[in-house]
Image (spheres, grey):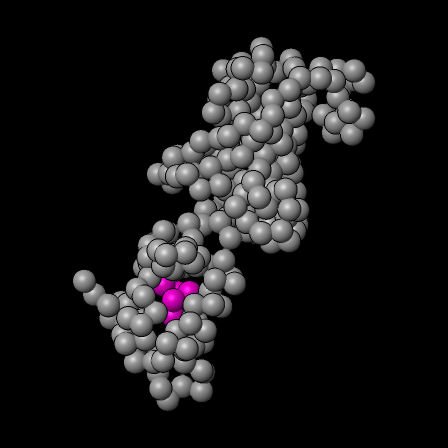
Amino acid sequence: MATLSALIGPLDSESRLPLYQQLQRALRDAIDQRMIGPEDALPAERDLAEDFSVSRITVRKALDGLVDEGLLTRRQGAGTFVNARVEKNFAKITSFSEDMAQRGRTPHSVWLRRSEGTVTPEESLTLGLSPGAPVYRFNRIRYADGAPMSLEYATIPAFALPSLEAVDTSLYQALERTGYRPRRALQRLRAVLFTSEQADLLGARANDAGLLVERRGFLKDGRTVEFSQSYYRGDTYDFVAELNDLS
């Protein structure tokens, strides 16, 4: 099996860039270019040090920086692994289950709460519903290949689903079956810091960086059929969007 130095090239002892930064940059590029794949294990620090002819302190400093960036993760007793990051295309209206399936990963959910009730004043404005209108609420942890990826809170007008039990794994598949799947959406993304409760549910730490995506989904006739808030782990998700020159 080829060594990492053979795969990504040797370090330059004549460069003004410190060796740990050279190694960090080389590993970062290899991860970005998928030369090292998600969930791949890196060689042990002593093996990396020997491979690149540097000290273990240099290797440790390089890896520490990539762990802080969220590109690598250390697992007690197992080693250092490439984080399995997922790219989410903002230009497409897809569900979490569809995103994972398209990437060859296995999605599943753990329900935290499923309930029915009436709209709150905030939901009434967001969903365009009259006060007292019935809604369904879904709160769950979303997983991919057994790893927690996001916390999802969704509110759906009751007219769009026959019952709470209509949603099994995919909310959008359930809405597709009833003819109420969103055809257009507005999304807003912002950075957040996880609370202790959110961090516990996502296997993160309190105050770790996360991403909150708020989505309003619309039917062809303009009615709002979905309001969701999803909290994503910042070390597992990249959000991308295609931009076009309209001039």
Q: Which residue appears at 30% of the width and 80% of the height?
A: 53
Residue 59: percent from the left, percent from the top?
39, 73
Q: Can you say whether 113 is above or below 5 in the image?
A: above
Over which residues does the magenta segment extend?
25-30
* Foreground pick, 42 / 85: 42
123 and 145: which is toward the camera: 145
Vertical position of residue 14 compared to residue 211: above or below: below
Question: Residue 227: image x %, image y %?
Answer: 66, 29
Q: Is residue 35 left or right of residue 21?
A: left
In this view, the residue farthest toward the front is 77
Question: Toward which corner of the image does residue 212 lie, by quadrant?
Answer: top right
Question: Horizontal and vertical percent for residue 178?
Answer: 53, 14
The secondary structure that most of the magenta stretch takes on is helix
Q: Is residue 19 magenta?
A: no
Identify which residue is drawn at 62% across, 51% down. 206
Q: Residue at x 57, y 44 (%)?
A: 200
Q: Report whether 150 appears left or right of 40.
A: right
Which residue, as the protein is rendered here, is positioned at the far bottom?
Answer: 14
